[in-house]
Amino acid sequence: MSLASSKPSLISGTGLGLRFEHYQRILAEKPDIPWFEVLVDNYMGKGGLPLHYLEQVCQHYPITFHGVGMSLGSTDPLNLEYFKQLKQLKQRFQPVHISDHIAWISVAHQYMHDLLPLPYTIEAQDLISDRISQAQDILGETILVENPSSYLSFTNSEMDEVTFIQGVLEKSGCDLLLDVNNIFVSAHNQGFDAYKYLDGIPLNRVREIHLAGFEYRENYLYDTHGYEVRTEVWDLYQYAIQRFGAIPTLIEWDNDVPDLDTLLGEAQKADAILNQVKSRSNLKTRAL
């Protein structure tokens, strides 16, 4: 288990992904958005406008870092140059937390532009847990890992996804970024019960939730992050919030990014669900 220290959450409510299409309006109007998630791989240059705008945004809003470059499930050694740049950005911008994925993107130091799945075996669980621990020791903090969206299963898998994630959390000491849309997509594609999946996630390990939109294909669902959150995912999210509490939530929209008002409308829907849970919690506290 990693010796990295955990830090308290400094975010709440529904945040948005920081996208270049919205820089100008965010800085001009300072809209009421509690926090932004930064796709940190887009800010690893030595200069330029992205870093210039990020500096300004950080003066007004807390941020989190979300990455795709750790390649935690790979058999390659960790890319220490990548982690060096990530640590420098962490020190400069002080994100509330850093997250990546239960996936791999590299083999023999060749990088692919996709988050590739793992077989759910003890060997793979031990591998990714050890690499997460290494990453946490390098960064000096507990990281979050995100559950994947999947379109196939491996014949040599020895356990289901929830059991695999339970082991990763226990062995590495990391926390979970729970992507509710990914659960719904995978459940449809793989034929499992999304609600039972949520029941298997440890109550005290979820630090952030992602919501996004998927695309209907001929015989499967495709996780595009290019649509509004679907009704079925809102239903699953409500169940998740009732189970885990008012966890900070992100509206994730990466492709065909709409105007800021559309994203704010999605955030308001999530906030309505979060506030329902907070209200019930307050009533229970007063009753005691």
Image (tube, rainbow, N blue to C red):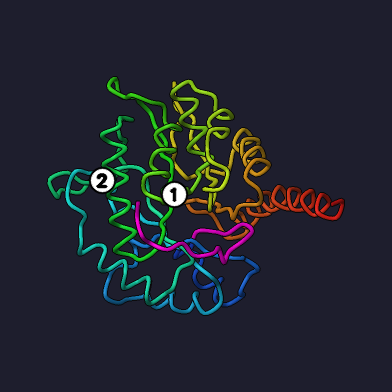
Find residue 201 and name its label: none
Give residue 91's position: percent from left, percent from top: 37, 75
Magenta residue check for 93: no
For marks 2 and 1, the one nearer the N-term is 2
Q: Residue furthest left?
A: 108
Q: Residue furthest right?
A: 287
Quick one: label 1, few (<14), some, or many (20+) residues within 10 Å? few
- Above or below, 139 against 219 in this view is below
Is label 1 in a helix, a strand or a loop? loop
Name the secondary structure under disc 2.
strand
Q: Which residue shows up at 53% across the image and 31% down it?
A: 197
Residue 108: name its quadrant: top left
Residue at 71% over, 47% down:
273
Which numbered tag is attached to residue 105?
A: 2
Q: Position of residue 33 (x, y in %)?
A: 62, 65
Which region is colored magenta? 1-17
* Residue 6 image point, x, y percent: 46, 62
Q: Give the Cα separation between the discs numbered 2 and 1.
A: 20 Å
- In this orientation, which residue lies closer to the viewer: 30 or 143? 143
Q: Amino acid at mark 2?
A: Ile
